[in-house]
Amino acid sequence: MTDMSIYLDNAATTSLHPEVFDAMKPWLTDNYGNPSSIHSYGRQARVAIEAARNNIAGLIQCASSEIFFTSGGTEANNAVITSATESFDIQHIITSPVEHHSVLHTIAHLEKTRGTNVSFVDIDQKGRINTDHLHDLLKDTPKTLVSLMEANNEIGTLTPLIMISEICKEHNAWFHSDTVQAVAHYAHNLNHLQIDGMSASGHKFHGPKGAGFMFISKRSRIRPFIYGGPQEHEMRAGTENVAGIVGFAKALDIAYDNMADDATYIQKLKNQMINSLSSAIKDVAFNGDLSNSLYTILNVSLPASESNQLVLFNLDLAGIAASGGSACSAGAVQESHVIKAIGADPNREVVRFSFSALNTEQDIKLATDKLASLYQELKTNRSGVPKEVRVNTKTEKPG
Ligand SMILES: Cc1ncc(COP(=O)(O)O)c(C=O)c1O
């Protein structure tokens, strides 16, 4: 083991900002009222929730009545897609093969239970949407829902939301975007975006886990997803996560205050890693669209080698946290659906590094040096680690 500790897995989750923690604390301790209670404890909590909602709506430029708090991105994606499909009797859903599983599995469920037709829009080797194909898929299909993510969580490729929203409006389709990896990294102006639904999650930008929201345009109201009490304008029942909601709004506030500087700084770190790896490892490649991708994610593709699976594990042993491109289910390593969908060589090993403003140039240097030396070592010494350790290298990939 090593004393080094470098966290480069910020697309999976981020550390809680200390000011966010401070803002949340009173709602976990003294101010524990239920926001539905009419006494002063409850009223204080209600005021805090509505202040958070107004704050968020001001930042992303929508009406506060269009924001509904959820337990995070997964719930928001499930809720928006399922409820919109039921509310508008959607017959056809168009999505892409590189969406997050909370979108893909929801759509697969609707296909199975409702018989909804599902189409996958073509993407290219960089994960970019083929907009001509989207036009074709939308032709002559009424009652259609389109769900396309803004920023891919594995390879970082960005989707032009404005263009996609215009295509959807042209064809009268309902448009949802999983914006979980993009919110707080890019400014959204929903007044100028013809989007019907979108999803966000606080723990991707130094907010708390278990707190997110769905935006649902007032132009197209949908039915509730969770039934029960009248919370969230009867759209999402359940006692609100007051501390989580307050923390979410605070984290978004901080992110907006620092967005331009952080984006420049993080992009610089990403460029540093691209340049260093390119000179240190012959034939290294980067998955995704480097010319138009989320500045927080770099998906590194290492030349094929028999010991590749050990790279992540050895990075972890060296104190460097990153993510892989494979997931394990029932003991078998499966290729990531994103890496597969872009047609990448399955024999190459994928390591996803994802950055935050808390990372330093030194972090990047150490991680790059380690990856380069590890790669050489594993290439020449196939028995890199003991056998029992190899078994433990198979883990479920988050985020
Ligand atoms: C693109 C994308 N969508 C949805 C989610 C799910 O968000 P949450 O962890 O808040 O459920 C994630 C994160 O894992 C994500 O990266």
Image (cartoon, rainbow, N blue to C red):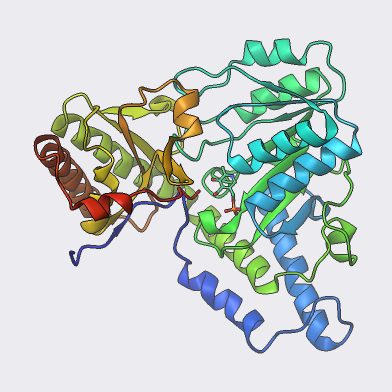
In this orientation, which residue lies closer to the viewer: 17 or 327?
Answer: 327
In this orientation, which residue lies closer to the viewer: 119 or 293?
Answer: 119
Position in image of residue 269 (x %, y %):
30, 44
Q: Residue at x 58, y 27 (%)?
A: 97
In this orientation, which residue lies closer to the viewer: 31 or 320?
Answer: 320
Q: Is 367 rendered above or below residue 85?
A: below
Q: Residue at x 67, y 37 (%)?
A: 177
Position in image of residue 149 (x %, y %):
61, 35
Q: Quadrant of residue 148?
A: top right
Position in image of residue 62 (x %, y %):
75, 47
Position in image of residue 136 (x %, y %):
71, 10
Q: Is 220 rendered above or below residue 226?
A: above
Question: Quick one: quadrant of the N terminus?
Answer: bottom left
Q: Is residue 55 left or right of residue 319?
A: right
Q: Is residue 46 left or right of residue 357?
A: right
Q: Residue at x 87, y 25 (%)?
A: 143
Q: How many marks?
A: 0
Q: Is 198 rendered above or below residue 317?
A: above
In this orientation, which residue lies closer to the viewer: 312 or 156?
Answer: 312
Residue 361 visible in the snapshot = no
Q: Quadrant of residue 285?
A: top left
Q: Is 348 rendered above or below residue 322?
A: above
Residue 327 visible in the snapshot = yes
